[in-house]
Image: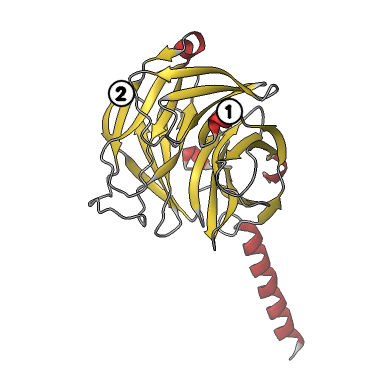
Amino acid sequence: MNFISKKIQFTIFLFIIFASCKNDKTLPLNTEITPQKITEIPSTLNEISGMIFRNDTSLLAHNDGGQGAKVFEVDLDKKKINRTIKIYNATNLDWEDIAQDDEYIYVSDSGNFLGQRDDLKIYKISKSELEIKDSVAAEIIEFEYPDQGSFPPTEIHNYECEAVISFENELFLFSKNHVDLKTKWYSLPKSEGSYSATLIQEFESEGLITGATISKDKNVIALLGYHKNSGDFEPFIWLLYDFPDGKIFDGKSKKLDLTFNAQMESICFGKDKNLYFSHESETGNLPQFIYQIDVEPFLN
């Protein structure tokens, strides 16, 4: 092989390497992490499926059915439930996530295990009332999926949602796709009413998405999920960041693989870029804890 041929081959090799590094959106680096244990969860929240940050010492959380239409204030330092707030005009058929903005929290009754539900709801609750009352009413946002044409009873479908965030004047929903292990991004208005959700985009999540959260500065979204392999849960977190004009799947992405076997269900950002997350008690043969990681070092 002559010198010119070798030079051409070397140039092509450098181009491939450069292109692969530049296009980290489609070829993210997987990073294995062991999160820090923050506190053990009170047994009342044995099916915790959603939580949001309240302040430095407390979270608001709820169960995935079985405990009624209640939101619990969890004291992180004392490892106990400070208050129980009942949503008296709501039912907890299958609550799966909770989101917040400056004025309201949004509890998503969007679990749809067999794909048959036609009564999907999000409960919108005033924060000012929540802080002073132990029993409050909710506005109700009803919705359906625009791309679901049939409702046969099956566990293998793409019309379940366990992940919701608040983004400016909209709610963003992320589906838990049992068929193709992707996630679909839908949007809904925040106003009370009945809507057909708007389908925006798909993302190759490589597993089942069970929770979502957004940083306070709106610059980072985290999607929690797991891939089930021979009965074991392999949990992960997708970080979505540097996205242009709210197009959250068009920015950078990085996958963090968690180093234990658990069915992760709930996640929220705290201060700065600290993530809190947890799992249900009946899976993974682990005690229930709230875990924490600082994701700032992974955002490059």
Tell me residue 190's x, y (percent).
37, 26
Question: In what element is the residue under mark 1?
Answer: loop
Tell me residue 87's x, y (percent).
40, 20
Q: Which quadrant would residue 276 be assigned to in this image?
A: top right
What residue is drawn where x is 47% and y is 15%?
127
Tell me residue 76's x, y (percent).
66, 25
Give the quarter of the figure containing the N terminus. bottom right
Residue projecting furthest to the bottom: 1
Q: Disc 1 marks which amino acid? A: Lys
Vertical relation: 12 (above or below) 138 = below
* Residue 165 appears in view: no
Residue projecting furthest to the right: 3
- Towards the viewer: 239 or 212: 212
Q: Nearer the viewer, mark 2 or mark 1?
A: 2
Question: In what element is the residue under mark 2?
Answer: loop
- Towards the viewer: 132 or 164: 132
Near mark 2 (Cα within 10 A), the count class, few <14, some 14-19 or many ≥20, is some
Near mark 1 (Cα within 10 A), the count class, few <14, some 14-19 or many ≥20, is some
Q: Are marks 2 and 1 in contact (CB under 8 Å)?
A: no
Vertical relation: 70 (above or below) 269 = above
Q: Which mark is residue 52?
A: none
- Mark 2 or mark 1: which comes first in sequence? 2
Tell me residue 216's x, y (percent).
58, 28
What residue is drawn where x is 50% and y is 55%?
207
Q: CA distance from mark 2 to mark 1?
A: 24 Å
Q: Which mark is residue 216?
A: 1
What residue is drawn where x is 59% and y is 51%?
235
Tag 2 residue: 192
Q: Disc 2 marks which amino acid? A: Glu
Colour logic:
secondary structure
